[in-house]
Image (spheres, helix red, strand yellow):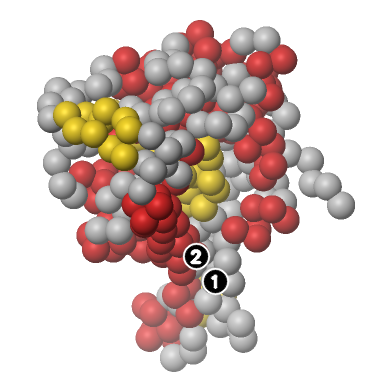
Amino acid sequence: MQAADVAAPARGAYTSLEDLIALRFPARQLQLARRNRALSALTGPNKSNFRGRGIDFEEVRSYQAGDDIRSIDWRVTARTGDAHTKLFREERERPVLLVVDQRPGMFFGSSNCFKSVLAAHLASLLCWSALDGGDRVGGLVFDGHRHREVRPRRSRRTVLGLLSEICAFNSALPLATPAPPGNFADMLANLRRVAKPGSNIYLVSDFSGAEDDNARKHLFQLAQHTQITAISCSDPLESQLPLSGRYAVTDGEARSELNTADRRLRREYRDAFNQLQISLQSDFARLGIPLLPASTSESPFALLQTYYGESRR
């Protein structure tokens, strides 16, 4: 990939390992440790419950006003009669986990690229940037039926292994059978098992199924011990019907005709998408999780540069 391509949207229905490797060079312009004003604004009024605890235990000292009550050492407190707090030493590089959605619903796009390709490019940029910053990088790729885990390591080989898994899942689309109900919640359950306390998690998905009660419970638990950033992949056709006309549509089996000249249909379609996005933003804001919008019509690098590039004053 040439430097001039970085400002352009991703292209195609499928990605390749060569394309994902080429993103290593523009990724050097991103700094994941920097949470600029644009990213902080997406967190909402509620700060994340994550406090960076559970990395390395260092010592116990007497409780002081303002200490997190969750850090109280109850055994020492009971033995001495005075409240004591556990202190933890923050690890300089936290494990970075990329969670990449390659479900059948991501195999969709009206221009430039499919959402599955957009997710792959975003994940690749984040992988290379994290590795360049000295972090251990790993991830989880899922398609609704199965998933693959890559344990976090600080090595180029590990990143290449994760990118290879993303390409393998991507090339397998479309799947012969749709993903079963509750598959997003199942993925989060697996993520809870994989993610260590203090991990820095990037969820790259269209978040179909995130409204499920079980999914919400898993997200709540994850947000207690990890730092999560969500990147929502969408396509313009999901928010706005095409120009007035009659269009043949199919789900791969049945065929039908859609008349987009119907104003009521256009309004209801747009309102349904907007309501879904508002609900998603509200759920994530309550957990202190920033939700970054990504579109197939825009450059994935430009999106990440907005939040992890140089802060502009």
User: Considering the image in quadrants, where does the N terminus appear?
Assistant: top right
Graded by Cα atoms within 10 Å as few (under 14), some (14 to 19) or many (20 or more), the crowding at tag 2 reads: some
Mark 2 and mark 1 residues within 8 Å of each other at the beta carbon? yes
Residue 204, image quadrant: top left
Q: Is residue 296 left or right of residue 180?
A: right
Amino acid at pointer 2: Ala
**Closer to us: 115 or 210:** 115
Disc marking residue 285: 2
Q: Is residue 154 above or below residue 232?
A: above
Q: Is residue 100 left or right of residue 11?
A: left
Q: In the rendering, which numbered label is found on residue 102?
A: none
- Residue lying farthest bottom? 81
Q: Which mark is residue 46?
A: 1
Name the residue located 15 percent from the left edge and 47 percent from the top edge: 181
Task: Judge whether residue 252 can be spotted in this image.
Answer: yes
Q: Is residue 29 left or right of residue 303?
A: right
Q: Looking at the picture, how far across and down is residue 209, in whole percent?
A: 27, 50
* Residue lying at 21% horizontally and 44% vertically, measured from the top left: 183
- In three-dimensional space, the C-alpha distance between marks 2 and 1, rounded to whole angstroms, equals 6 Å
Q: Farthest residue toward the right?
A: 313
Depth check: 114 or 312 in front?
114
Q: Earlier in the sequence, mark 2 or mark 1?
A: 1
In the rendered image, residue 10, in percent from the top left (x then y), is placed at 54, 22
Tag 1, which secondary structure?
loop
Please name the residue shown 69% across and 53% down the image: 38
Front-most of 88 and 29? 29
Mark 1 residue crowding within 10 angstroms, few (<14) / some (14–19) / many (20+): few
Q: Nearer the viewer, residue 120 or 96?
A: 120
* Number of residue marks: 2
Q: Position of residue 303 (x, y in %)?
A: 63, 38
- Name the amino acid type tagged 1: Asn
Q: Say if 148 sits above or below 44 in the image.
A: above
